[in-house]
Amino acid sequence: MSENFEPRIVAFCCQYCSYAAADLAGSMRLSYPPNVKVVLVPCTGRVDPLHILRTIEDGADGVCVAGCLEGDCHFLEGNFKARKRVAYVQRILNEAGVEDARVRMFNIAASDGPGFAEAARMMTETIRALGPNPLSTKTEKMTEEL
Ligand code: FES
């Protein structure tokens, strides 16, 4: 693994909680690794397994799905569906010989800016330890676009 490896992580964050927590972390000037790129979604229940797999295929080294706390989803069960889908994607990755820790679900309250910063740090360290995504066929292309 290259010593200069910097993980590229995509975080699908629901607008009501985890996206607000990410915003709050910024407002609180909490430092967390810039490796995590946030994608706003209406609810984690809208994140399809294909979105996660396509993100990995397109060169992300890790993917987080971050939603409301359990019981707080504004669409009632979206985060429970997301948790099942993340587990499903983890099984597919395992079958493909890829570490399932590259995909992870977080539940973060809107008021928990520090929790978002901690999740970003944790995910970045995990992926840094795993190294580059072995499935990526477009890593170079993505790097050029950034
Ligand atoms: Fe946040 Fe559903 S609205 S997970």
Image: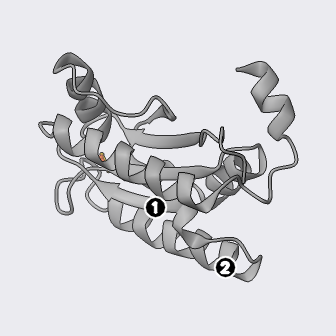
Q: Nearer the viewer, residue 86 or 115?
A: 115
Residue occupied by mark 2: 94
Which residue is more in the foreground, 28 or 64? 28
Question: Mark 2–mark 1 contact, CB under 8 Å?
Answer: no
Amino acid bearing label 2: Asn
CB at disc 2 and ligand 1 closer than 8 Å: no
Q: Kindly give the residue lying farthest to the left in the view shown.
A: 111
Q: Is residue 145 left or right of residue 9?
A: right
Q: Is residue 29 visible to the viewer in this orientation of the structure?
A: yes
Identified at 66% across, 38% down, the residue is: 4
Q: Name the residue under label 1.
A: 104
> Does residue 78 appear anywhere in the picture?
no
Residue 2 percent location from the top left of the image: 72, 46
Residue 99 falls in image quadrant: bottom right
Q: What element carries label 1?
A: strand
Amino acid type at mark 1: Arg
Q: Return the x and y of residue 127 as percentages of the image width and height.
A: 54, 55
